[in-house]
Amino acid sequence: MSVKLNTRQVGDVSVVDVAGRITLGEGSSALRDMLREMTGKGSKKILLNLGEVSYIDSSGIGELVSGFTTVTNGGGQLKLLGLNKRVKDLLQITKLYTVFDVHEDEASAVRSFA
Amino acid sequence: MRENRNHAPETLERSLDSTLESVDSAEELALSVAQRAGFDEDDLMKIGMAVRESMVNAVVHGNRYSANKKVRLLVTHSPERFTIRIADEGDGFDAANIPDPLAPENLMRTSGRGIFLIRSFMDEFEMHHREPRGTEVTLVKYVVSK
């Protein structure tokens, strides 16, 4: 299964539910396109829900970093929600876990946006 | 856990096209052998990702998706070692030139983590140039603890 993306609005926070594999090719490009579209439309508060992500490779990690940079440079905030153990381990190994603002609970994640 | 392993030797060899589909195929093929070798879920994830990253390097950076170049995959399983060799026909590159992805100035780079992840997930990793051209990487996961 490749990646599936679904967006929804919770207050003024745009939540992106990501499911499947974020890998080189369709998976990472779909996420990149989605984040660019959202920032292009002016979304400033983006919460990536990775709870249903089964697999992420170095290209997928690169897309998370790229998305974070794009949103931050545009004056917005991008946060992560619901990392499974594999994704959490990958972000820790690559020292990116502390770069991202990571939450386990959606309600508190939404509240954390200033 | 490293129990209940199947120690029957096994060898699998394929010549693959330089496509992203081959990346998926190589991962599936290597994992099928690794599963029969008895690796647990955590090790399977590490092996699968190491194979995927190596294949991406071969297809994208080595052969540059060339329809005229193949990627050779060799998976062998002995009682002590699970070994994967992946060879491309590209111009080769020097891994020493890849910036340290953990250095603070490189943390926000969008690429350059593949070989770091392979080294993190496998017990041994070697890379060497092939003659007349190409790069071959060797990935090893120990079947029994050292």
Image: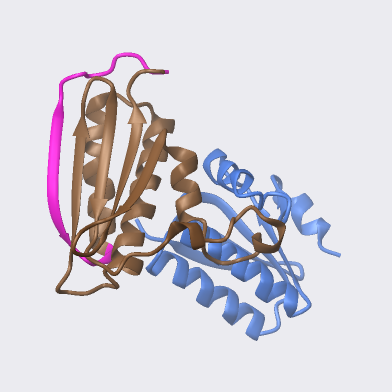
In this rendering, the count of numbered labels is: 0
Q: Is residue B84 left or right of residue A17?
A: left
Measuring 64% from the left and 85% from the top, which residue is drawn there? A40
- At x 35%, y 18%, the residue is B144
Q: Is residue A77 left or right of residue B77?
A: right
Tell me, what hue is chain A?
A: blue
Left/right placement of residue A88 relative to residue B82 reads: right
Q: How is the image coloured?
A: by chain
- Magenta-drawn stretch contains A56: no
- Of B114 and A69, nearer the camera is B114
Numbered range of the magenta stretch = B1-20
Chain in brown (letter): B
Q: Position of residue B20 (x, y in %)?
A: 28, 64
* Quarter of the figure with the C terminus of chain A: bottom right
Examine the rendering and report whether any part of residue A53 can be seen.
no
Residue at x-position 81% and y-position 62%: A113
Name the residue nearer the viewer: B27 or B91.
B91
| Residue for point 68% across, 71% down | A69
Q: Is residue B98 above or below residue A66?
A: above
Percent position of residue B73, x then y: 20, 49
Q: Is residue A7 above or below residue B8?
A: below
